[in-house]
Image: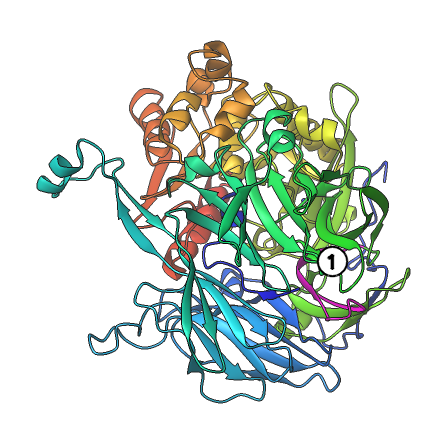
Amino acid sequence: MLTKSRPLDGISGFYRAHKAELLSLALLLPLAGVSLSVNSTPRDHQITIDDFFGLSTMTQSQISPNGKQSVWVESRWDEALDKAQTELWHIDNNSRKTTRLTFSDENESSPVWSPDNRYIYFIAKIGEKDPLHPYQGIAQVYRIAATGGQPQVITRTVTGVNAFELNRSGDNIYYSTTKEITDKDQFAALRAEHGKVNYAHGKKTTHPIYRLNLQHFNQELLLDDDKVVWQFSVNDNETKIARITTTDNELIFLEGRSHIEVFDIKQGTNTSLADEQWRGKAPSPYGWLLGLDWHQDNQRLAFRIDFDGYPGQLFVANTAKQAHIIPVTPPNQVTYFGDNLHWRGDSNDICYRGAYKARVKLYCTEMNGSTQGKSRAVIEGDLVIGSYSFTDSGKQVAVSHDGLDHVSDLFIADADSPRAQLKRLTHINPQIDSWKLPQISIVKWQAADGTQVEGILELPFGYTKAQGKLPLVVQLHGGPTAATPYALQHRSYGRSTFSANGWALFSPNYRGSVGYGDKFLTDLIGREHDIEVQDILAGVDKLISDGLVDAEKMAVMGWSNGGYLTNALISTTDRFKAASSGAGVFDQRLEWMLEDTPGHVINFMQGLPWEQAEAYTKASSLTHANKITTPTLIHIGENDERVPLGHGQGLYRALNHYLNVPVELIVYPGEGHGLSKYQHRKTKMLWDQKWFEHYVLGKE
């Protein structure tokens, strides 16, 4: 298959971002199937907020075609630049010698190996904008030797490269760029004449696809049909281009109005795949298409669709037979996770990440013609896998993986073995070896209706029950179609920070979370602000009854859907002494009106606002705001399109001007749904810490 880049703004970023008793509180639980070195460094460092900014994060890891080398994108916070900065890193898989390849102040991404294992192609914006060189300072494809050196610019497009693929022989690059289109309707001239105001529509950015020959550097426009292209993939014999397309850039078009099209390069013809299975027969009309990958037979195309609130689906289409589209069923209780699909080498295995009980594993399913064969986890154990890639043969796999005593490291394994063992290659955060790590365990309890629910519990380093009850922070994941993972995390949303300061931190995987079966996921539909709130409170009661938590010293926090649930909890109960609501929905009608993916609201409310008025009322914390007495800290981005600023302002108005509840509203200038600035992240973490210490622990 062609080696492909990931788009600079991958659509996966739009998504809503994981035994009968309390398990052993051992400092480190073993990871089955993982080979790790023994740590002899004394654990004497108390984790701090500043340690968060010293962590490196590994993404987009790629093993070389012959399996002897790997490359990855490493992200680090840079205080001077006030942002996270990414660079390319390389490792020799045998000697484990690592080398930093790039050193610019710009972000490198989307690494792809050349077939001869000598070069790495990637996307970057290098240099300042220059009228004499209009391609500088704009995203281009670059090439750098695996041994290091000066990157060479490969493309020279004045509008920038969005994504690219390198063909199997390494002599052609396919890439998409941008072109602005102005609508030619009856009011186009009037909009152009009065162009100093903003219009809701009238212009869009489309994505032509080019082919660049790397031997002669001849460039050819292959496809320009005024479509918005969210992702594309070229088959191995370079006869077909598959695309996920919409007619407009607005994100709402991706929800249920996106298509998979197959373009025949030689014939110049374009065909849309019949979409009855993932549209007409789908659990929701608001599905997101994602994840294209061609089999080496050049005919079969794998792709996915995701939904808010419903389990995602995976399909294999035989493009030589228009009606031949096969749904792939995942293993029991596994939820498809992410958009990185890969056929494994020359095999018939389609491989994907799947969420399973707070883990994220790599699964492969054998597809023999129109028949689904066996599915298997490629590597067993308590894994939280990020990116992964196979060698050309498919016999070796490299995965980035978070464990209980490390974050974001690269491992390799034999992908053919039924009992594959992970071999650790990198150690990109050696400082963690000295950290006093939280004791991470899984707690299970029964919900009010008898359903078993799980959550992740962090307790302070060295803590025992004999030391007494702990204050509690309940930290709630976003989505809600997501889950808190069973792995070490140091996050600006609470994990590691609070347990290091003597708190218990509890992250429930409430109803609606992935990895616990389809029913567990869909139980939340039509019951937001109700069933998941009861799940969370039942989990808190479990910790109290186990004698771990002081019921008089509890706080709650979350971001995105976690912020929504924070609002829901404080408008349901007065048990929490403090709250931190981050980017949280306050009113469901306002959310439908203003957010960029309204299908999310429609799915959970089971209809539009005028169809399900009572549902929108019940699921809005605004309706229950008069019950709020909890001192609340509100965080929100000024330019958040997912949970717009009005939600934070409305919650602040209710608490400050009408209910006389202690409240602080923090609006982060220029930020969207997540906080991208160094200082903004630190501001949030410090405010959360001081707010909880004051209102829960009584500190000045």
Residue 394 within the magenta-colored segment of the rendering: yes
Can you tell which quarter of the image residue 128 is in?
bottom left
How is the structure coloured here? rainbow
Q: Quadrant of residue 133?
A: bottom left
Q: Can you see residue 340?
A: no
Left/right placement of residue 594 relative to residue 151 reads left
Residue 517 visible in the picture: yes
Q: What residue sits 18% from the left and 37% below the top?
A: 188
Residue 316, x across and y down, in percent? 70, 45
Q: Position of residue 404 (x, y in %)?
A: 73, 59
Residue at 65% x, 47% y: name it: 319
In terms of depth relative to the viewer, which is nearer, 242 or 45?
242
Quarter location, residue 487: bottom right
Looking at the picture, how far across and down is residue 657, in whole percent? 29, 24
437, above or below 290, in the image: below
Horizontal side of 374 relative to 683 (left or right) equals right
Neighbor class of circle 1 (other Cα within 10 Å; few <14, some 14-19, many 20+) is few
Residue situated in front as seen by the camera: 261 or 552: 261
* Magenta segment boundaries in residue numbering: 382-398
Q: Amino acid at mark 1?
A: Gly
Residue under the image location 64 percent in, 25 percent down: 281
Q: Position of residue 239 (x, y in %)?
A: 58, 60
Seen as rendered, the residue at the extreme left is: 193
Q: Is residue 122 magenta?
A: no
Give SS at disc 1.
loop
Quarter of the image with the N terminus is bottom right
Give the residue drawn at x 57%, y 82%: 119
Q: Nearer the viewer, residue 523 or 683?
A: 523
Q: Residue furthest right?
A: 418
> Where does label 1 land, which residue?
462
Above or below for 44 versus 700: below
